[in-house]
Image (tube, grey):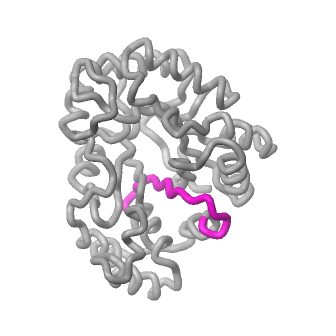
Amino acid sequence: MQTRKLSNGVLMPILGLGTFKVGEGNEAYDTVLEALKMGYRHIDTAQLYGNEASVGKAIKDSGLNRVDIFITTKLASSKLGYQEAIDELKISLEKLGTDYVDLYLIHWLSPSDALNQQTWKGMEVCYELKLARAIGVSNFKIHHMDAILKIAKITPMADQVELHPGLYQLPLQNYLNKLGIALISYGPFMKGEIFDQNGPYFETLNRIAEKHHASVAQVVIAWGLARNIFMIPKSVTPKRIQENYNSLDVKLDSEDVLTINNLNRGKRVYTDPDNNSFVKQA
């Protein structure tokens, strides 16, 4: 699996398996184990997903060395705070059955800059204690990142956001690039909208897919990879998991990338970070 360096030198696989809404128990266990057998080496979970224990068991039972697997988890939105960031990671580590995670993210931010800043200070402690090899954020827009950077001793190493053909996030990417912060895409398939033959995306994506003898899903993943974005598509179907993995063999040209960029409508299909109602307040 190809990797790229985060700002601190940690190598992160460019393609991972997302586990949002992958149920704790057999579903999460079987899905992760199957993905690891196929060649995936980056597994993305979160406290909010409720499946860390099954993810950890699958990793253990895979027979692979821990150092060869990249694990991302995220601090629950109801647990923001300095001490909470530290304590909750320790709970996650116990569930995952590991001494460290490779990337630890603030999952959703608070409307309170002060609370986000205190949380980030706790994340920095996790990094200094080597409980996480890298730390970062999720769902942070430019103005959210600006507030964190005012107090940060350690610049976030990654920002995981909703990113797909309908929301290409190019301004955010340009901003993060200047800071050396990696961009990670979740929800690349727009909850299935890219497959809607009557929608605004399918015709263009399918034309590019036919050109490359690939699927629409593979083209979208390849588009992100061509932009140096880390991709973490989610699936529980072995056939789809394999199809997504094979995106690594699809190489788009610059014209393809620009064409897909032009599909951008600034459209979100997930929660807007500025209007979320499920996080801890100050």
User: Residue at the spot x=56%, y=34% of the render?
Assistant: 102
User: If the image is split into quadrants, where does the N terminus sit?
Assistant: bottom right
Q: Left of 117 or right of it: where is 95?
A: right
Work out whether residue 10 can be spotted: no
Q: Quadrant of residue 227?
A: bottom left
Q: Which residues are magenta?
A: 227-240
Q: Left of 228 or right of it: where is 132?
A: right
Residue 39 position within the rendered picture, expressed as x and y whole percent measured from the top left: 68, 57
How many numbered discs?
0
| Foreground pick, 228 / 145 | 145
210 versus 217 height, above or below: below
Residue 94 position within the rendered picture, expressed as x and y whole percent measured from the top left: 65, 23
Residue 141 position within the rendered picture, expressed as x and y whole percent measured from the top left: 24, 41
Q: Left of 26 or right of it: where is 169?
A: left
Is-magenta flag for residue 206?
no
Main secondary structure along the magenta-highlighted residues: loop
| Foreground pick, 13 / 4 | 13
Q: Left of 21 or right of it: where is 282?
A: left
| Foreground pick, 259 / 264 | 264
Work out whether residue 91 can be spotted: yes
User: Residue at the spot x=69%, y=43% of the render?
Assistant: 25
